[in-house]
Amino acid sequence: MLALGLALAVSMLIPLVTGGSYSRLVMTNFRAPGLLYAGLGIQLALEYLPIPESRWHDVGFGLLVASYVLILGFCAGNLILRGMAIVMIGVACNALVITLNQGMPVEDAGRRAGESWIEPTIKHHLADDDTRLLFLGDIIVVPEPFGVVISFGDLILAVGLCDLTYWASRRPRRATATARVGADLPGWPGAAAREGRGAAAREGRGAAVGPARRAALDLDPYVGGAARGPTPPAAPHA
């Protein structure tokens, strides 16, 4: 959970450093947010509730897998949002290695990260010779002052959260393009005024060109057709 907290903290700085809008970020319309709340709530409960160690591999593991199913369901329902696909890949990587190993394997936790991961929990345990897909486990050491070990899935999740907050804090391009196209449609606010200005400009150009064109018509009897002079004789046939 500490890795997720760090990723969220970094992603929340993205609108500030990139000129985004926190109000647009807060107003983002997420689908089925209850799935996310339920999934995170289960993981928090597994961290702090006193579940007997004898039930870690049945009740605890079942709840852990269920939490990832809920979180993945939330991600799948919001794939329309830019950046959510990357978030989903990161969550899926963690869910896969946890499911295959009945928990997140931590490589050399006691030696590489001090006392933080010495004691196994429902979610974390030391890697051994039977560990599967260890490269997706917690093998990346974050030095002090954090002193934690994270996985590649955590890194992918962090990148996805930053990408998600970046785009969610900005005005959608589709809305901007729709506004520009709609401004030219009849009935759109301001369209009548723009049409009036365009008609006035066209009349002004016509008034400026009119006298010169009329003078040319008066000088050349063949300009303007039969209304301006006699029809030129046809060429004799050979």
Image: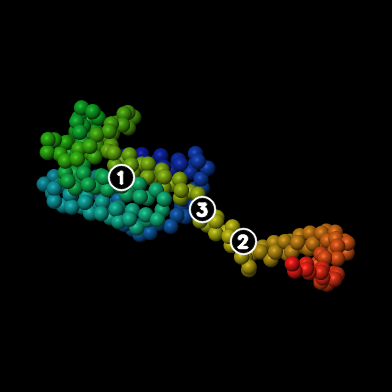
Mark 3 neighbour density, 10 Å: few (under 14) some (14–19) many (20 or more): few
Q: On the image, numbered disc 3 is attached to which residue?
A: 173
Residue at the (78%, 67%) spot, across then down: 235
Front residue of 74 and 179: 179
First in sequence: mark 2 or mark 1? 1
Residue type, mark 2 in image = Ala
The alpha-carbon separation of the residues under discs 2 and 1 comes to 42 Å
Residue at the (31%, 31%) spot, across then down: 142
Residue at the (62%, 62%) spot, across then down: 184
First in sequence: mark 1 or mark 3? 1
SS state under label 1 = helix
Give the vertical position of 183 relative to 154 (above or below): below
Q: Are marks 2 and 1 in contact (CB under 8 Å)?
A: no
Give how far across and how far down residue 234 sits, in percent.
Answer: 78, 69
The alpha-carbon separation of the residues under discs 1 and 3 comes to 27 Å
Give how far across and how far down residue 38 sits, in percent.
Answer: 29, 55
Task: Left or right? Give the position of 238 relative to 145.
Answer: right
* Circle nearer the viewer, 1 or 3: 3
Give how far across and how far down residue 26 sits, in percent.
Answer: 46, 52
Mark 2 neighbour density, 10 Å: few (under 14) some (14–19) many (20 or more): some
Task: Left or right? Give the position of 144 relative to 188.
Answer: left
Front residue of 227 and 87: 227
Q: On the image, numbered disc 2 is attached to which residue?
A: 183
Q: On the image, numbered disc 1 is attached to which residue?
A: 90
Which image quadrant for residue 37? Answer: bottom left
User: Does residue 31 show up?
Assistant: yes
Residue type, mark 1 in image = Gly
Give how far across and how far down residue 72 sits, in percent.
Answer: 29, 53
Front residue of 227 and 153: 227
The alpha-carbon separation of the residues under discs 3 and 2 comes to 16 Å
User: Does residue 51 show up?
Assistant: no
